[in-house]
Amino acid sequence: MEKEKLIIFDTTLRDGEQAPGFSMTVEEKLTMAKQLEKLGVDVIEAGFAAASEGDFEAVRRVADEIKDSTVCSLARALHSDIERAGEALANAERKRIHTFIATSPIHMKYKLKMTPDQVLEKAVDAVQFAQYFTDDVEFSAEDAFRSEREFLYRIFEAVIAAGAKTINVPDTVGYAIPEEFGQLIADIKNNVPNIDKAVISVHCHNDLGLAVANSLSAVKNGARQVHATINGIGERAGNAAMEEVVMAIKVRHDYFKNVYTDINTKEIYKTSRLLCRITGSFVQPNKAIVGDNAFAHEAGIHQHGMLAHRETYEIMKAEDVGVPSSKIVLGKHSGRHAFKTRLEELGYTNLSEEEIDNLFAKFKSLADKKKEVFDEDIEALILDEIFQSEEAAKLKYYHVISGNTVLTSATVKLEKHGEEILANGYGDGPVDSAMRAIEKALGVKTRLKDFSIRALSSGKDAMGEVRVMVDFDGITTSGKGISTDIIEAALKAYIEAFNRYTARKKFLENRIDEGI
């Protein structure tokens, strides 16, 4: 049997970015899109061009610079939305407009206040109008799983006749069970007369933790495109995790005998870590494929089995998803050549000589403070060097006085928009007092919503990573700071959150609620 390609439609930059705390600037979206292209994603949904000027610009920039992947913009079934999508995608090498309208009784009655016939007419009109801008049009029936089957068949037949090349079947609220979602796809194949003229796509949400399972069940029953996001981010509980769908297809090729993907799986881990860096989020340690513990073994029985034969407890190789399998330790006596070789082994092969020189200088400085420098330390330096936020403010120095018999105080000096600012703060401990001093120096009203610390590597001199979520006058942003000094890491995290706030203030204005 000849294998068919499973199209990977990545919506990290659209549906994923809609999740609270995951918004990205134009530059961050472009950085992420370039990595998705390197990963081998077939379609990149770069945003919702009509949502805001920021989203329009993000779609336009991605469309201008991405050449190997199809670039897509979401659009409601409105001429104004579709026109904005067409304008943003004008220079794309490959472009797609993804238009949608709700089809379930509850959505049509309470949200749209339209009859099924009106919805069908609107869908057909949207697909026809979108073809003025591109011949690659995808139609989504929002809340398809809770829609009446006969109406779904009618609307899909009509939009395919109108020119839609892909029909998407979303489980918008994550309500489906794998067996019944797979059956829905089979029923669509068997009851839409012209279904052979379109690709069946699925878009599954994870409210019951079944997004990946539902997507795979759909593939088994004939779907040939899957909407997914890196790390499974997205509205509410998220979307189907792309890395899990892809690796399930690859590892269980005996079960999914007739499909394949073009994803370069060795780029998965790096893509996951880049998204974490950009959004200031963590992946839980036990996350499949990309979690810190995905290829870790602590139990004695497991360790014994692994030493005897790797496949006793591992169904895939760490290297297959880009996780470094070796733990070569570098130190202060290591030279630039050894450092550059380790960067290449970790997958960072496209760094400029200037970037390597900067990283090597930081590595030597870190090596003087630590006895051993681990792969995690090196990766942290890379991410901190290459993917920085715009620096509206930066830390010049700080000084903290703390003890069990003195009032803890901190002094910080910042450079904010080119001006140096000195501020003092008092608190319950060194971190609290330093944060209060930072707030005074920044001169904005803030509320700390989340503060977490973790060690990036082993040993008492390990690098620490601090993550914060801060509300700046109603706009919540996140930041990360990395240092062997946890106070310095906390200050860096707070300042990065502020820098993200200044960059996003305009970007987040007047955003509208986005669909599926």
Image: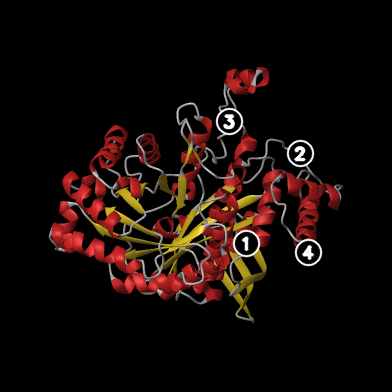
- Note whether 210 is above or below 166 in the view shown: above
Residue drawn at (43%, 69%), measured in percent from left and top? 55
Q: Secondary structure at mark 3?
A: loop
Q: Which residue position is annotated with label 1?
A: 387
Q: Which residue position is annotated with label 3?
A: 316
Q: Which residue position is annotated with label 4?
A: 354
CA gap between label 2 and label 1 equals: 25 Å
Amino acid found under the numbered disc labelled 1: Phe
Q: Secondary structure at mark 1?
A: loop
Amino acid found under the numbered disc labelled 3: Met
Camera-nearest residue between 128 and 180? 128
Camera-nearest residue between 343 and 394? 343
Viewer-nearest of discs 4 and 2: 4
- Of mark 4 and mark 1, the one earlier in the sequence is 4
Within 10 angstroms of label 1, few (less than 14), some, or many (20 or more) residues? some
- Of mark 2 and mark 1, the one earlier in the sequence is 2
Viewer-nearest of discs 3 and 2: 3
